[in-house]
């Protein structure tokens, strides 16, 4: 008999089981079924929970919070700001690499935007909304994903210790209320998109600051150059 692969890594499943069994999540699933009947949606079903596979619950050291997935063909694969191999870096990710290079004196090329290497090191790359209709940004807001990802953030805050949350842009910064700052660290800045990066994302030095915080706790710093 064929074994059915669980929806996400076991430690996450244990923490989030009440959400998966809730009425709101049943309604969210019904919404997604109807959406996929009528429209192309991203990412592919197998990739929706990629972040939860790449970074098990107990391994989370850093959280980067995005908004909704990329809505262009082939871009979204379940990790915020990341794209699959062979896909051109979106502008926000180009700016993230620029800030890392300026902050750390590195030379990450803006040619490969796949961030699985960060995820494997404990950088949890979470979008606020985990799906989107093709070519229609924000189309899956307000249907339950926000409640789910708020629960994810709250559970990290409740059960973990010393996690660094990188919150870029007002929607991400608004999630600060879910985080216990007596146990965790929050770094905020404008969003790295071309519309706002020059208002304070460039020069925020979040990547060196994150590693300083991790080192102060006796944790291994993130090798930000190791993107794959």
Image (cartoon, grey):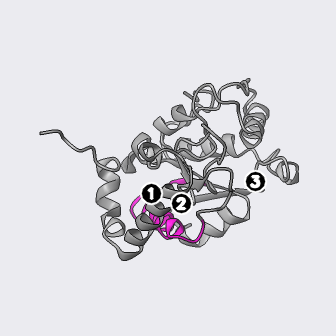
Can you tell which of label 3 and label 1 is closer to the viewer? 3
Magenta-highlighted residues: 141-165
Q: Name the residue under label 1.
A: 161
Seen from this angle, which residue lies furthest left? 1
Disc 3 and disc 1 in contact, CB within 8 angstroms: no
Q: Name the residue under label 2.
A: 184
Instruction: Say the numbered circle drawn on residue 191.
Output: 3
Q: What element carries label 3?
A: loop
Q: Is mark 1 on a helix, strand or loop?
A: loop
Q: In this view, does 134 lie to the left or right of 220?
A: right
Q: In this view, does 57 lie to the left or right of 106?
A: left
Mark closer to the chain start, 2 or 1: 1
Label 3, label 2: how far apart the Cα atoms are:
21 Å
Disc 2 and disc 1 in contact, CB within 8 angstroms: yes
Q: In this view, does 123 lie to the left or right of 21?
A: right
Q: Residue 216 falls in which quadrant of the image?
A: top right
User: What residue is drawn where x is 41% and y is 74%?
Assistant: 24
Where's residue 68, x and y in %?
62, 55
Question: Magenta span: helix, strand or loop, mainly?
Answer: helix
| Magenta-colored stretch includes residue 133 | no
Label 3, label 1: how far apart the Cα atoms are:
26 Å
């Amino acid at each position: 008999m064929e074994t059915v692969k669980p929806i996400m890594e076991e430690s996450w499943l244990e923490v989030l089981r009440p959400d998966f069994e809730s009425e709101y999540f049943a309604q969210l699933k019904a919404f997604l079924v109807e959406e996929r009947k009528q429209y192309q949606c991203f990412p592919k079903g197998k990739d929706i929970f990629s972040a939860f596979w790449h970074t098990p619950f107990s391994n989370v050291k850093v959280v980067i919070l995005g908004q909704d997935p990329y809505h262009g063909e082939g871009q979204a694969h379940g990790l915020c700001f990341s794209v699959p191999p062979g896909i051109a870096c979106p502008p926000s990710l180009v700016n993230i690499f620029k800030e890392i290079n300026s902050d750390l004196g590195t030379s990450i090329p803006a040619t490969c935007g796949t961030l699985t290497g960060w995820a494997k090191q404990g950088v949890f790359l979470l979008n606020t909304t985990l799906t989107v209709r093709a070519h229609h940004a924000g189309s899956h807001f307000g249907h339950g994903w926000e409640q789910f990802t708020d629960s994810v953030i709250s559970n990290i805050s409740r059960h973990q210790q010393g996690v660094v949350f990188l919150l870029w842009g007002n929607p991400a910064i608004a999630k600060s209320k879910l985080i216990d700052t007596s146990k965790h660290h929050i770094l905020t800045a404008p969003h790295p998109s071309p519309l706002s990066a020059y208002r304070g994302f460039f020069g925020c030095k979040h990547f060196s600051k994150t590693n300083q915080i991790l080192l102060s706790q006796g944790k291994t710093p993130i090798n930000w150059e190791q993107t794959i």
